[in-house]
Image: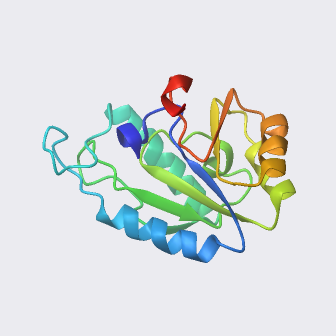
Amino acid sequence: MMNNGQSCICAKRFIVHSDIYSEFQQRFLEAIARLKLGDPMQDDIDLGPLATMDGVESLSRQVESSTRAGAKVLIGGGRLVSSQYFAPTVLTDISPGSPAYAEELFGPVAALFKVRDLDAAIKLANDTPYGLASSVWTNDADEQGRCALEIEAGQTFFNTMSASDPLISM
């Protein structure tokens, strides 16, 4: 939700192992539900408006197209009436070929995916034309090595969020 999801390195696709998926989803939704929309100049506000109306309309089309293709909206789901504000949204059960599956959703929309193992996670991570940055969360050195070699991204961060300056995470 950094910069209202309007950053190329914002986490957008969350690929989660099936063993922890339910707990992750519950905690994630609780965190999203706590976000406050409003004037971004106010200290207690988490999300402001999107940069342009075109961006709001494009994001709305992507979410609507994804839901028509079978994606489920767990929270949020659209823009606030006649404004540049878009409700923080979480999608799941996302079908291949739908916009939320592989396109960049340039706004406060997260796509949750459940996978059975590391092979499936890497395959899904690479099943997009985008890949500026990735963030992998594991303490297993072998998994980190595989992800570093096999995920097709400009940068891969481990156990921290992606950053524009790699020195930030050091």
Q: What residue do we see at 59% from left, 56% from top?
A: 66
Between 54 and 133, the one nearer to me in the picture: 133
Position of the C terminus by quadrant? top right
Q: Residue 123: image x %, image y %?
A: 83, 49
Q: What residue do we see at 49% from left, 61% from top?
A: 90
Quarter of the image for residue 14 reads bottom right
Q: Residue 62: image x %, image y %?
A: 53, 47
Query: Residue 147 vs residue 81: left or right?
Result: right
Q: What residue do we see at 48% from left, 38% from top?
A: 106
* Residue 149, above or below 80: above
Q: What residue do we see at 86% from left, 55% from top?
A: 119
Q: Residue 121: image x %, image y %?
A: 77, 54
Between 160 and 127, the one nearer to me in the picture: 160
Query: Residue 161 vs residue 38: left or right?
Result: right
Specify how the rendered protein is coloured. rainbow
Q: Residue 132: image x %, image y %?
A: 63, 29
Quarter of the image for residue 23 reads bottom right
Query: Residue 149 vs residue 79: left or right?
Result: right
* Residue 85, above or below 155: below
Between 91 and 116, the one nearer to me in the picture: 116
Between 170 and 135, the one nearer to me in the picture: 170
* Residue 91, above or below 162: below
Query: Residue 153 vs residue 57: left or right?
Result: right
Residue at far left of view: 42
* Residue 35, above or below 9: below
